[in-house]
Amino acid sequence: MATPTTTAPGGKTNRLGLGVQSYRGGKSTLCAGCGHNAISERIIDAFFEMGIDPQRVIKMSGIGCSSKSPAYFMGGSHGFNSVHGRMPSVATGALLANRQLIAIGVTGDGDTGAIGIGQFVHLMRRNLPIIYVLEDNGCYGLTKGQFSPTADIGSTLKNGVVNDLPPIDTCALAIQLGATFVARSFSGDKKQLLAILKAALSHRGTCMIDVISPCVTFNDHDGSTKSYSYVKDHDEPLGDIAFVPFFEDIDIDYEAGTTKAVTMHDGSTLLLHKLERDYDPTDKVGSLTVLHAMGMKGELPTGILYVEQERPHFLDLLNTVDEPLASLPVGRVRPPKAVLDEIMEGLR
Amino acid sequence: MPTPEPVLTGRLDPSGTGRIVNDFSIQVATVNGSGSQTANLVLLRSIFQMGVPVSGKNLFPSNIAGLPTWYTVRANRHGYIGRKKEVDILVAMNAETAREDVLALGAGAVVVYDDWLDLQSLRDDLIFYPVPFDRVAAPAVTDSRLRRLARNMVYDGVLSWLLGIDLDEMRHALRRQLARKPKALAMNLAALEAGFAFAGESLTKRDPFAVEPMNATAGMIMMDGNAAAALGCLMAGVTVVAWYPITPSSSLCETLIGYLRKYRMDPVSGKATFAVVQAEDEIAALGMVMGAGWAGARAMTATSGPGISLMAEFSGLGYFVELPGVIVDVQRAGPSTGLPTRTMQGDLASTAWLSHGDTRHVLLLPSSVQEIYEMTNSAFDLAEQLQTPVFVMSDLDLGMNMWMSPPFPYPDTLPVRGKLLTAEKLQELGSWGRYRDVDGDGIPYRTVPGDGLPAYFARGSGHNEQALYSERQGDWVRNMDRLARKFETARALVPPPEVSLDPEAHVGVIAFGTSHWGTVESRDQLRREHGIATSYLRLRAYPFTPALAAFIQRHDRVYVIEQNRDGQMLALMRAELDAPLIAKLRSVRHYDGLPLDARTITDDVLRQEGVTAAAPVAAGIASGGQ
């Protein structure tokens, strides 16, 4: 159990009695204006507002600017800044050891799209219960601005070098591979990103959230398609997202024709209000078609792109006991002598 | 054509009776995928059931079907179960290799062969027994498609008659193998008996080899090392297994999965008290093990050399972040793909230092199936005590071949979970730092997610005692020195070597792992044939313990026997021993992919001692140390 910490006088507390301070971390060492810092803020808000016990949370990351950020939120939670591109496997192992943990992974477009594409692919198809936040700026920040695999074709580096390869659409890939909650957002869209993160906390399965997060130092210039101005101009929300947590007693009233209500695994309700376009985030093939068509037009569809509630997550598939495997007593993990004797007898 | 009378000069017959009892090797040459494994195991088991010490080794290609494969069975009344270099009895079932196989035999050897191969014309110093396998099998097995498989049981029947292996023991062994397949059992029994009957009616025994019942295997088991390691993991209470298939390690995790499904389902909930993941590669497999270890589970993986190479980065992370985990390396031959189905002790140096930037790992070195059972169990204890990855260095010979052994003891100690911080300990310490050396042994206290105790941020980057990011020189050096101190602590925790001193010996030998079996036999050869007494130290772990230096100190020359080209264990010794001790070390290296045999060691030691095989000398009078 987490101990409630003192909050500023008059400060709000959540359902655990914790103030937002309990969800903050160390001071960021990223560049001022970096999109990643805004994402860390939204993660703090989402975990605070959903009343998640920080002691049950594990913060996982690979290597890169993005992967440093778990140090900057939820300082009271365990974190693991692991190996470049290999966070999915470390997170998988941790959740196998203790299925009661709530995992958030933070990664970047190089960490996921290049060195880690293999582990990304297999994480998505396993549908491991983890919130996988891809802080996507189209470049390698920590090695000073080289292209990453999500850089759009025709975009340029600061020095004018043109990217002549097509980008990997991590969201389309995630949907195709079997992730059960796929979203795209923009670090500058506080409202949408917060709603997506809170909905993700209500979902048991892989939540792949691609957040366009401009790199102010290396990729915020005119030739970039991951700059603040470009993303603002091309952001096309697929719908308005409203999220009603299971613990909030609110009557939900919505228009059946234009709003789709999805009941999340924890009983929360996700309301997706259609804008002008007809988009059904529970239609796997349809969502891929729309993503492709909009991408071809240079539009950046954001919002909850795909959600599937039926598919079992990886830990349920493995059918492990409810308790953490890590702390099972010896009597439950070492078979009795009779078993050894039986095996030995069979080998005589 | 009459078979010429053989000249029997090539075989020792110490009894003078014209019989060589319970001391021979059989090599069955077949094509892989031809279904000979059942017949070979029946042959092995039937001799074992007669109480005769025996070992079986499969020398097979990296292929599913159609390439040559050899199975060797060695019976030895003295209990030598290492590979024997010389083949006494060849069963030639493979037309493609038959000629080469026959030409390689020593004089006096026996050849049982498919008669149409017409091998008897190749040599006049061997004993040939032609057998028309198809004709013998035909009445027993009417289905012509199955006859190809049944041919193998015919040679078992022939060998039963020739060597005096009790046919009932063969029937018993066959029933064990095929208990669940009554149709196949009936067919194989018929073929076995047809082979026996044919030999009795058509062959005249002219060779000296015989099996007679002994009482040397009573109560013993037969098992391969991969299964024994799996059993060790089961008894250690492993909860997370992540693996990627690779020869020759795959059967370890497959056997473990079988045990877990059978013995580790929770009786109340019907759910698993384990998780097994077939990962996307070895990188992910070790990543999962490290993640699980970080979160407090007993986690393991098994692999071979190429997997070890891929695990380098995570091994370094495990060393530096200080995470427990068990890796069983079933070593195979060569760099790159090498010889995937041949054996080698080839990953010692690379694993001891696996990863970049001053990394060192604990290696355990099992020699027998019982020892790998015990060492996999204790590897989990060591990994948690030391908070570091621990490598169990098996090899293909141990892992995939059948070894007789006393039955394994049930673990007599509870799992050792190491320095997990508790609320009481925290109270006692007042404050806690993840990487603070409280006890002076280099091993800090750790917490795990979900335990309700203080959290920390694990990172592969530079950190201080509080696990906070730090690039300060002082923090860095202090941490690296503590890790070195922890490795010194490991010396006191790893299994010490097994030392057998001969007070007359000026020569010492050092071996480890499967090199042990050829080494014990070679020591007897050196003493019996050349009067050279030796002392023996069998290494069981890296880092070395002080017993190693003491052993080298008391001998003039010390031979380090290993199965690799470059003397990797010798190199590890050179890295930490003093110069006068290093000067005493000599190297015996074997690296052709086959298990090391005694004669190879004996010949090499004699050569380096300046003794020719024909001129035995008394103990200790060969040239002094360098």
Image: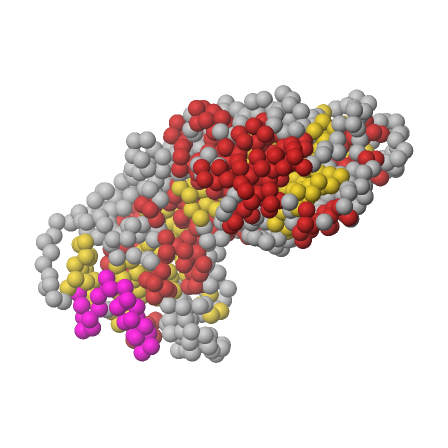
Frontmost residue, B240 versus B142 = B142
Reply yes or no: does residue B568 show up in magenta. no
Quarter of the figure with residue A67: bottom left
Frontmost residue, A234 versus B117 = B117
Image location (x, y in percent) of residue B73: 65, 36
Please identify the quadrant where the C terminus of chain B is shown.
Answer: top right
Residue at x 41%, y 59% (from the top left corner): A121
Position of A91 relative to B199 (above/below) = below
Residue A234 visible: no
Reply yes or no: does residue A288 show up in magenta. yes
Image location (x, y in percent) of residue B152: 59, 42
Image location (x, y in percent) of residue A258: 14, 67
Magenta segment: A273-297
Residue at x 18%, y 68% (from the top left corner): A274
Residue at x 37%, y 72% (from the top left corner): A227
Frontmost residue, A156 versus B124 = B124
Position of B198 relative to A178 (above/below) = above
Residue at x 59%, y 49% (from the top left corner): B32
Residue B370 located left or right of residue B202: left
Quarter of the figure with residue B168: top right
Residue A192 located left or right of residue B122: left
